[in-house]
Amino acid sequence: MHNDFIEISVIASAARPQYWLEFYENISKNNLVPFEIVFVGPVEPDFNLPSNFRYYKSNVKISQCVEAAYRFSRGKYVFPIADDCLFCDGFLNKLHSHTMQNDMDKVIVIPRSARRWKVKIKSLYHRKNDKYPVVGLTSLMKKDTYISCGGIDNRFVNVYWHEDVHLRLYDRGYTPVVANDCIFNELDRGSYLTKTYGADDHKKLISLWSNARGEFVPKRQDEMKCFKDEGLLYYDQGDKRRM
């Protein structure tokens, strides 16, 4: 259930508080859209947070932190992002304008990454085929849309869960709207986490969206495995991290 006074919830699995105040100041600059920030992660900040910035401590895996942030969010729209990002001037205003221009019961809005503005599934499969759909590094969608699609599959540990969410929505008739005027940039780029768990999560994505010959198919090949509310912040659910 969303709060009528919050339009956008900006959420993240967060472990780098050294970036958070700059993150907040940057996304707030010249902003007119009522928003909140919801971060979930293992490292508590040693400074006070603004009133519309909530932090929940948790040592669970990355994808589960994001799922918790989704569930704790109160906005009409939800926007997941990394906690080390900077944004173009008026980013939330521009992002929100796309909700006014489109039927948000049928689309998701994909902002542009300064390092990689959009991704096609073909790049994940390392094959050329223009029929593969466009997915984003992140997207803005209605919270109700996210809930209705089942959220993040608990088999993912860190990355590629967002591609899976996008593809499930496309299968249900949603289409992507690429917001070229909404630009963000990651400072750290999460290279350690991607290298540590990326290959395993990539294999999971491929297995869920491939036929027996390893070719992309637009229909998911297995049922969702959802996170449970019980213990969401306290112990890993689904596939575990390598220790």
Image (cartoon, grey):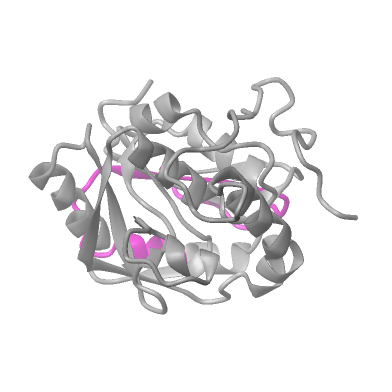
Looking at the rendered image, the quarter that the C terminus falls into is bottom right
Q: Nearer the viewer, residue 214 or 119?
A: 214
Q: Based on the displayed image, in which of its 4 quarters is residue 88 positioned?
A: bottom left
Q: Which residue lies furthest to the right in this view?
A: 243
Seen from the viewer's position, the closer of residues 45 and 130 is: 130
**Residue, far left:** 101
Q: Which residue is drawn at 49% across and 64% down?
A: 21
Q: Residue at x 66, y 49 (%)?
A: 204
Q: Where is residue 213 in the image (x, y as percent from the top left)?
A: 60, 54
Which quarter shows the N terminus?
top left
State which region is magenta. 23-52
Residue 160: image quadrant is bottom right
Between 122 and 100, the residue placed more toward the observer is 122
Tell me: 68 left or right of 145: right
Left or right, residue 194 beside residue 99: right
Q: Residue furthest front?
A: 213
Q: In the displayed structure, would residue 212 be above or below residue 147?
A: below
Q: Is residue 26 magenta?
A: yes
Give how far across and how far down residue 22 sits, in percent: 45, 69
Residue depicted at 53% across the width and 65% down the height: 125
Above or below: residue 208 compared with residue 242: above
Q: In this view, does 83 lie to the left or right of 76?
A: right
Q: Can residue 46 be seen in this view?
A: no
In reply to whether residue 77 is colored magenta, the answer given is no
Which quarter of the figure has residue 143? top left
* Rendered location of residue 51, percent (x, y): 43, 43
Q: How many numbered circles are shown?
A: 0
Q: Evaluate whether residue 154 shows in this view.
A: yes
Location of residue 62 in the rendering, given as x and y in whole percent from the top left corner? 66, 50
